[in-house]
């Protein structure tokens, strides 16, 4: 029997939610603008996903993030954390993370709250980088799509009981739901989504927010 989804929110509802939200900070707006400038177009989570991350970070003082870029999602997480919360974020591109650090400072986030590990994420985990020892209350994954499964397996031993794992881009602009599309990134994300939703270690679901957010509560 086909599931009837009934009413679905659209642009009008999104605009109404935006009208209720607190004004976007100047720093977050500056990162959004910078991400769209120049030929690179640095990918960041969308604003709706950022707000979800901030809400999920409430009450979670120890966070690990795979993929920093300009530090947009990092800042949303930091703003949502309780006072004194800390984040370890991993990215090999120091030129981007140096810019991110400047924005975090501008937003009033103390340097000792955010540790940047300048390395490829799987290498950093394998090297037993001390900053990544955990335990972490929340893990956010937003880096190389074919490596999502590897990130998750590296993160699981570092999770606190009841921790939450969040992964971005899991709908990949709808491509994961199109069987005619099977490039490397799409195939990896499709397999990752299916594996996590079947994994007994987690209670997981996918939110159709932004480019798709996978939420997985750790049962350990």
Image (spheres, grey):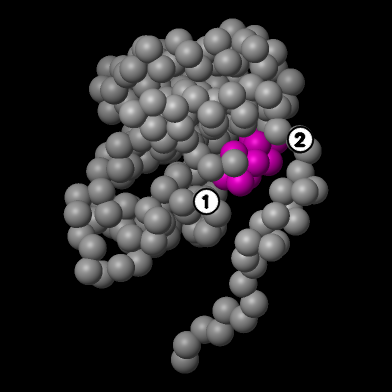
* Residue 67 falls left or right of residue 190: right
* Residue position marked by numbered label 1 in the rendering: 210
The verdict on residue 49 being magenta is yes
Pick out the residue farthest to the top: 111
Q: Is residue 78 visible?
A: no
Secondary structure, magenta segment, majority class? helix
* Residue 144 falls left or right of residue 34: left
Contact, mark 1 vs mark 2 (Cβ under 8 Å) = no
* Quadrant assignment, res 119: top left
Measured as percent of width and height from the top left, residue 182 is found at 20, 60
Q: Residue at image x 77%, y 48%?
A: 19
* Quadrant assignment, res 168: top left
Residue 164 image label: none
Q: Whole-Å distance between the Cαs marked 1 and 2? A: 19 Å
What residue span does the magenta drawing correspond to? 48-58
Pick out the residue farthest to the front: 38
Q: Residue at image x 34%, y 17%?
A: 93
Q: Is residue 133 placed above or below 8 in the rendered structure?
A: above
* Residue 121 falls left or right of residue 26: left
Q: Residue at image x 60%, y 16%?
A: 104
Q: Residue at image x 59%, y 8%?
A: 111
Give the class, few, some or many, for how many residues have Cα within 10 Å of label 1's Cα (few <14, many ≥20). some
Give SS at disc 2: loop
Measured as percent of width and height from the top left, residue 205 is found at 51, 59
* Residue 128 falls left or right of residue 30: left
Q: Is residue 41 placed above or below 187 in the rendered structure?
A: above
Measured as percent of width and height from the top left, residue 95 is found at 38, 12
Q: Mark 1 or mark 2: which comes first in sequence?
A: 2
């Amino acid at each position: 029997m086909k599931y009837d989804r009934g009413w679905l929110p659209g642009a009008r509802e999104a605009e109404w939610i935006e009208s209720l939200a607190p004004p976007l900070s100047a720093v977050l707006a500056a990162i959004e603008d910078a991400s769209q400038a120049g030929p690179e177009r640095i990918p960041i989570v969308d604003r709706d996903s950022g707000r979800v991350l901030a809400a999920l970070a409430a009450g979670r003082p120890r966070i690990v993030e795979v993929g920093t870029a300009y530090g947009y999602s990092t800042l949303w997480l930091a703003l949502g954390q309780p006072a004194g919360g800390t984040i370890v974020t991993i990215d090999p591109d120091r030129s981007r993370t140096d810019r991110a650090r400047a924005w975090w400072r501008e937003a009033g986030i103390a340097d000792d709250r955010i540790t940047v590990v300048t390395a490829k994420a799987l290498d950093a985990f394998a090297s037993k980088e001390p900053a990544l020892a955990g335990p972490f209350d929340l893990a956010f994954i937003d880096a190389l799509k074919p490596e999502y499964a590897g990130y998750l397996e590296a993160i699981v031993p570092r999770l606190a009981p009841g921790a939450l794992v969040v992964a971005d881009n899991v709908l990949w602009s709808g491509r994961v739901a199109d069987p005619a599309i099977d490039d490397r990134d799409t195939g990896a994300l499709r397999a990752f989504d299916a594996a996590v939703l079947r994994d007994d270690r987690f209670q997981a679901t996918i939110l159709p927010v932004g480019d798709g957010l996978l939420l997985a509560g750790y049962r350990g």
